[in-house]
Amino acid sequence: MKAVIQRVKRASVVINGAEERAIGPGLMILVGVAVGDTEEDARLLARKCAEVRIFEDEQGKMNRSAPELGYEALVVSNFTLQADTKKGRRPGFDRAAKPPLAVELYQLFVDCVGGYGLASVKTGEFGADMQIDLLNDGPVTLVMDTAEWKRS
């Protein structure tokens, strides 16, 4: 599984041109599930994302987590994170997991993130047409990849 985490002042997602879900300060998390990912990957990635210390403390050091500060998270599924861009100019998506596995692991990720003390967790809708608006704070953007962790 792969996640792109952004420290944001605010973020929102509009789903199918109608419903909007928004957060104030916190984490914008895009999640991509790969073929072969497991429940263990989802749980580990959720913990790392929720607890990552990317918010500044009183000394200006990135030493605080979103739950410590009472912040929120917006989590959106994004299969394009699993794109293969090695050859040519058109990305391939064979590595991206298909439903039902992708849906199950995405939902498990969301449920697990919600268990780490964030003020709230809002989500996009798996497979829907979505537009995301955010104000990146810093900017601070991290990529976390469970496949990379397994190679180390």
Image: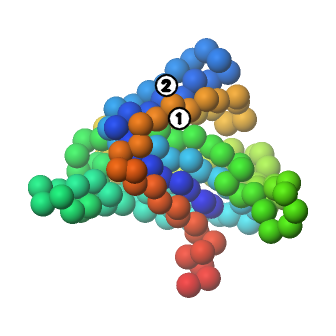
| Residue positioned most to the bottom | 152
Residue 99 on image: x %, y %? 77, 45
Quadrant in the picture for residue 85: bottom right
Residue occupying image coordinates x 63% and y 43%: 77
Residue occupying image coordinates x 76% and y 46%: 100
Answer yes or no: is residue 23 visible. yes
**In this picture, residue 115 sits left or right of residue 46:** left
Answer yes or no: is residue 114 visible. no
Of 146 and 110, the residue lying toward us: 146
Name the element at disc 1: strand
The residue wearing badge 2 is 21
On-image quarter of the N terminus: bottom right
Residue 69 on image: x %, y %? 22, 46
**In this picture, residue 44 sits left or right of residue 58:** right
Quadrant in the picture for residue 19: top right
Q: Amino acid at mark 1?
A: Thr
Name the element at disc 2: strand
Of 16 and 150, the residue lying toward us: 16
Residue 62 on image: x %, y %? 26, 61
Q: CA distance from mark 2 to mark 1?
A: 7 Å
Of 133 and 24, the residue lying toward us: 133
